[in-house]
Every structure is written in structure tokens, then in C-alpha cells.
Amino acid sequence: MYKTSVLWLCTSLWSVGLAVSPIPSRSPVKNTNVDCTGPIAFSSTGSTSVHSTGLVAYKQNVVNLAVTWDREVGVFTCACSGLYQFSFTGSTEENTRMVLKKRLNNGKQWTPIIATKPGGGSATILLEVEGGDQVAVHLDGNTKKFNARHEQEVEVTSFSGYRIAKS
């Protein structure tokens, strides 16, 4: 009876864990280590997973000078307002697009900004971002999957952002 109950509990928790997507923090102000006078930049590579919401998570940080960049969730939360450049690239399944989306501070909806064609590609854009706004790459399409064949030897998926001017 004990082993069956523990197994049921573990199975239940595992299935719930797969269905729940992490909720990105909306309060960058709590982090007192934010220095808005210095450089703010991040760059991550490799697709580890895609959350059920379509948010893309990344394997590793190449550069992380943005204390509010969370590669595991795939969301940049702006702590220092300004003009930012965002770039992303990846190879997706043929009916899936990569879409850069922005969510305003205290907003509930993600707004599409720029996308690749189905099958993936790359895009770069300048975007004004205010404190508390969030920016992330999502996969939109039937499968919401990257083309795993292209991630074999070297990472082809990346997401980078940096502030080029203060506001």
C-alpha cells in the first residue's frame, strides 16, 4: 500500500510538473543589484525545451550582463528603460514560426513584434522597452518544435538583446 501511494504521488506530481509553465517574475525592482549605468546585454544559445505556452528556453548563456534575463524560462524582464536591439535565430519544424513578443508592465497579453517564416530563420529589431516590460521568443504553429536535426553538432538557436540607448 505504501509503495503504491508513493508511486501514485510521484506520478501525479510529475504529470502536473509537465503541464505547468513557469510564470516569469514581474518585479525586477526587488533585485537591488541592477546597475542601469552600465552595459545591459544577454545572449543565449541552444534550445532545451519549449514551454506549453510556446516560450523558448535556452541551454546556455554566452553573455549575461542583464540580471533580469532568465534563460530557463526564456524571458527578459526590463529593469532599465531604453532602446534595445533584439536578435533571434533558429530552425523550426516546417509549420512553426519563431515570434518575438513583448508584454507591457502589468499587462496580461503578449504582443507579436516580428516573426520568422515557417521553418525558422532569423530576425533583428530595435525596440523601446520600459521598466517591467517583458520580451521573449515564442514558437507559434502546430508542433511548436525546433528542428532537432540542426542542433546536433553546434547550436543554431539563439536569442540576444542589449540596450543601445537609455531613455
Image (cartoon, helix red, strand yellow):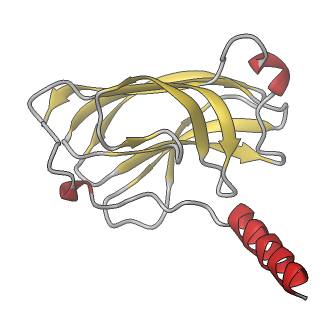
Q: In the figure, 78 relative to 58: above or below? A: below
Residue 133 percent coordinates (x, y):
32, 52
Residue shown at 90% from the left, 81% from the top:
4
Q: Nearer the viewer, residue 102 or 132?
A: 132
Horizontally, residue 150 falls left or right of residue 27, namely right
| Location of residue 9 (image quadrant) | bottom right
Q: Residue at x 61, y 61 (%)?
A: 21
Q: Position of residue 82 (x, y in %)?
A: 20, 36
The residue lying at 28 percent from left, 60 percent from top is 27
- State the image coordinates of residue 89 (x, y, percent, origin top left): 60, 22
Is residue 34 shown to the viewer in this render?
yes
Q: Quadrant of the C terminus?
A: top left
Residue drawn 16% across the image and 43% down it: 33
Picture quadrant of residue 106: bottom left
Q: On screen, 32 above or below 90? A: below
Asked if residue 112 lies left or right of residue 86, the reply is: right
